[in-house]
C-alpha cells in the first residue's frame, strides 16, 4: 500500500446507471485513506490524451442520483494497440498515478488486464454494464435500473396491446447476453422470451401462437438484440407471414434502457464495490475485479472475468417457461 499514493478512476464502454455512485465511492474512500484521486475522462481515450483531473470530495457531491457518468466514457480502439497503451502509461506516469480503478464491462477489463501486466501497474475492475454479462459477479452496476426501465416500458406497452388485442415484439439490449430479456420478461409476465443463450425458443413461440395466443387479450414477446433470428423486426416479419391473422407490432427500446436515475439497489451496490476497490488496492491486489456473489464482496482475477463465460440461470429459464 505504501507505494500507492495517487489513484485514477475511469469509466469505459457502455455507460450504466450507478457508475456515478461508484466514482463517488472510489474518490471518497481514496481520500479517506490518504490517497489523491484523479478522474480520467472518456475512458482509455482520455488516458491516452492526458484528459485527467484531480478530484476532491466536493467534485463528487450531488451525483449519486444521476444516470450516465460524470467522467464520460468511450470505446477506445487505440487502446487495443501496444502503442496506445504505452501512451496511456506515459500519461499516468506524468501525473504520478500509480493505480487505476476501471468501471466497465469485459472489453474494458481486457485492456486493464493487458496494461497491468505490460507496465506493472495495479488495475482494479468494478463491473459496470446493464447487460450483467460478466463472469465472477452475480450482478453488474446498472442492471437493476435497466430492468426496472424495461419493465415500466413493457407495462405501458401491455396497456395498449391489450386494448387492441395485439402481439408485440419488444427488443431489449444485450448483444451477446439475455440477462435483461430473461429477467424483465419474467417481471413483466411476457408470453415469450428469445435470448442468444437458449436455442429452440422460436419453436416454443410458434406453439404458443398456434395453441394459446388467441385465448389472451395480448401477448408480449421479449427479444434480446443478440438473439439468433436477427432481432425483433426480423422475427416479427417471419411470424407475420406464418400467422397472418394476428395484429403484430414491434418496439425497440434502445438506449432509454441505459439512462435514468439509478435504483437504490444500484446505488448501494456501486457504493459497496467502489469502497471494496480501494480496499483491494490497500490489500496489495493488482489485477482483479471486485464483484458481488450471494450478496458478499468477492475478488476475481481480471483475466478470469474475460475468459470465462457467465451463463444465464437455468432456474430462471425454467420459471419463465412454466409461467407462460
Ligand atoms: O454493452 C452494453 C450495451 O448496452 C449492449 O447491450 C448494446 O448492444 C450496446 O451496449 C450498445 O452500445 P452503443 O451505445 O455503443 O451502441
Image (spheres, rainbow, N blue to C red):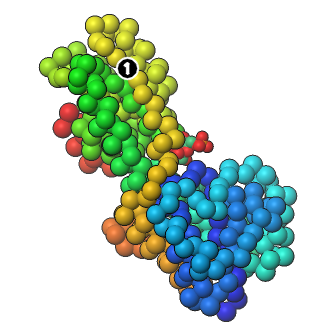
Determine which quarter of the picture holds residue 322: top left
The residue at the far left in this view is 215
Determine which quarter of the picture holds residue 302: bottom right
Q: Is residue 292 left or right of residue 69?
A: left
Q: Is residue 196 visible?
A: no
Badge 1 density bin: few <14, some 14–19, many ≥20, Cα 10 Å: some
Secondary structure at numbered mark 1: strand
User: Residue 272: x percent and y percent?
Assistant: 44, 74
Q: Which quadrant does the C terminus fall into?
A: top left
Q: Is residue 234 left or right of residue 43?
A: left
From the viewer's side, name the closer residue of 137 and 63. 63
- 111 to 268, vertically: above or below: above
From the viewer's side, name the closer residue of 189 and 256. 256
Q: Is residue 83 left or right of residue 150?
A: right
- 50 to 105, vertically: above or below: below
Ligand 1 appears in which quadrant? top right
Q: Is residue 169 left or right of residue 246?
A: right
Q: Which quadrant does the N terminus fall into?
A: bottom right
- 201 to 88, vertically: above or below: above
Q: Is residue 297 visible?
A: yes
How many discs appear?
1
Residue at left 72%, top 51%?
Answer: 76
Residue at left 66%, top 76%?
Answer: 55
- 160 to 183, vertically: above or below: above
Residue at left 52%, top 70%?
Answer: 62
Residue at left 41%, top 42%?
Answer: 178
Q: Which residue is mark 1?
A: 249
User: Residue 83: x percent and y percent?
Assistant: 85, 58
Q: Is mark 1 within 8 Å of ligand 1?
A: no
Determine which quarter of the picture holds residue 161: top left
User: Residue 154: x percent and y percent?
Assistant: 33, 36
Amino acid at each position: 500500500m505504501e507505494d500507492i499514493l495517487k489513484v485514477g478512476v475511469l469509466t469505459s464502454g457502455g455507460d450504466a446507471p450507478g457508475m456515478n455512485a461508484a466514482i463517488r465511492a472510489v474518490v471518497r474512500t481514496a481520500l479517506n485513506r490518504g490517497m489523491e484521486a484523479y478522474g480520467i475522462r472518456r475512458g482509455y481515450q482520455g488516458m491516452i490524451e492526458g484528459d485527467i483531473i484531480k478530484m476532491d470530495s466536493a467534485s463528487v457531491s450531488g451525483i449519486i442520483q444521476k444516470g450516465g457518468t460524470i467522467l464520460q466514457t468511450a470505446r477506445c480502439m487505440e487502446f487495443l494497440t501496444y502503442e496506445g497503451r504505452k501512451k496511456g502509461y506515459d500519461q499516468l506516469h506524468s501525473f504520478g498515478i500509480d493505480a487505476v480503478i476501471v468501471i466497465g464491462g469485459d472489453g474494458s477489463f481486457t485492456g486493464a488486464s493487458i496494461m497491468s501486466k505490460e507496465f506493472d501497474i495495479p488495475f482494479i475492475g468494478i463491473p459496470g454494464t446493464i447487460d450483467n454479462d460478466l463472469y465472477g459477479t452475480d450482478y453488474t452496476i446498472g442492471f437493476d435500473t435497466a430492468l426496472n426501465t424495461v419493465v415500466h416500458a413493457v407495462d405501458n406497452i401491455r396497456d395498449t396491446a391489450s386494448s387492441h388485442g395485439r402481439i408485440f415484439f419488444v427488443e431489449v439490449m444485450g448483444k451477446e447476453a439475455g440477462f435483461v430479456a430473461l429477467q424483465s420478461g419474467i417481471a413483466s409476465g411476457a408470453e415469450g422470451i428469445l435470448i442468444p443463450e437458449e436455442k429452440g425458443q422460436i419453436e416454443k413461440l410458434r406453439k404458443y401462437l398456434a395453441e394459446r395466443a388467441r385465448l389472451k387479450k395480448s401477448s408480449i414477446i421479449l427479444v434480446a438484440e443478440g438473439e439468433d433470428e436477427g432481432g425483433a423486426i426480423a422475427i416479427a416479419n417471419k411470424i407475420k407471414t406464418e400467422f397472418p391473422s394476428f395484429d403484430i407490432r414491434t418496439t425497440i427500446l434502445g438506449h432509454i434502457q441505459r439512462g435514468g436515475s439509478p435504483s437504490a439497489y444500484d446505488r448501494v451496490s456501486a457504493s459497496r464495490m467502489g469502497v471494496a476497490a480501494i480496499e483491494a488496492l490497500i490489500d496489495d491486489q493488482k489485477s482483479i475485479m471486485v464483484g458481488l456473489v450471494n450478496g458478499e464482496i468477492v475478488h476475481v482475477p481480471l483475466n478470469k472475468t474475460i475468459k470465462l463465460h457467465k451463463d444465464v440461470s437455468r432456474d430462471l429459464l425454467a420459471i419463465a417457461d412454466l409461467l407462460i
